[in-house]
Image (tube, rainbow, N blue to C red):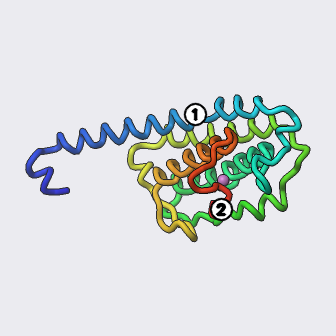
Amino acid sequence: MLWRFAHTGDRCFEDEMEELIAYRARLLAQAEEQLPRLQTRLRSFNLDELHAPLERGGWSPHQVLAHLRDVEQEAFLPRFRSMLREQTPLLPYFDESQWMEQHYDQEEDPEAMVAAFAAARRSELDDLRAADPQGWSREGRHPTQGIRTVQWWFEYCVQHTEEHLRQLAGISPDQHPTAASE
Ligand code: NI
């Protein structure tokens, strides 16, 4: 990169930084818009549909919601917190299948689950909006993903919700989002 500074001064760097900041702002907006989208999608199911598998042998919308809430609360939120506060922390592996087996409760109120998901997401948004540009480049070490930045994890987090929103809309995701790697 040094040669570019030599030829163009700081202007180029400033443009890139501006683009990056705009990109991050769009990502934050998308993450926030996913909350009402999820709410609307879930309200489109009646009680029977809420508990019926979306595909043969697959999860019901209620199970997808439990999964979204759990991954956000147990995996993503603590990862952002530790990356923003510690030096390259170890980010624990989250076994989503095992977690579902041990914690899933069919009786849980879906509105409360949406609210818990939203609370975790809003905490992430608060942390990331408070972070300076360097904060987004902080890193964490994950057992299977390796060393990744805050931005990489946030892109992954937003993408994860998108995939499950598509699943709830009956659109098969490119990669089925139930791989136990979150
Ligand atoms: Ni998932």
Q: Residue at x 69, y 49 (%)?
A: 73
Q: Residue furthest right?
A: 107
Q: Secondary structure at mark 2?
A: loop
Please state which of residues 165 and 132 is positioned toward the viewer in this rendering: 165
Report the label total.
2
Q: Position of residue 165 (x, y in %)?
A: 64, 41
Position of the C terminus, as image quadrant, is: bottom right
How many neighbours does mark 1 have within 10 angstroms: few (below 14), some (14-19), or many (20 or more)? some
- Whether residue 94 sits left or right of residue 51 in the image: it is left
Three-letter code, disc 2? Ala
Query: Gap between marks 2 and 1, in whole Å?
Result: 25 Å
Above/below status of 142 relative to 41: below
Position of the N terminus, as image quadrant, is: bottom left
Q: Is mark 2 within 8 Å of ligand 1?
A: yes
**Residue carrying label 2:** 179
Q: Is mark 1 within 8 Å of ligand 1?
A: no
Above/below status of 148 relative to 84: below
Three-letter code, disc 1? Glu
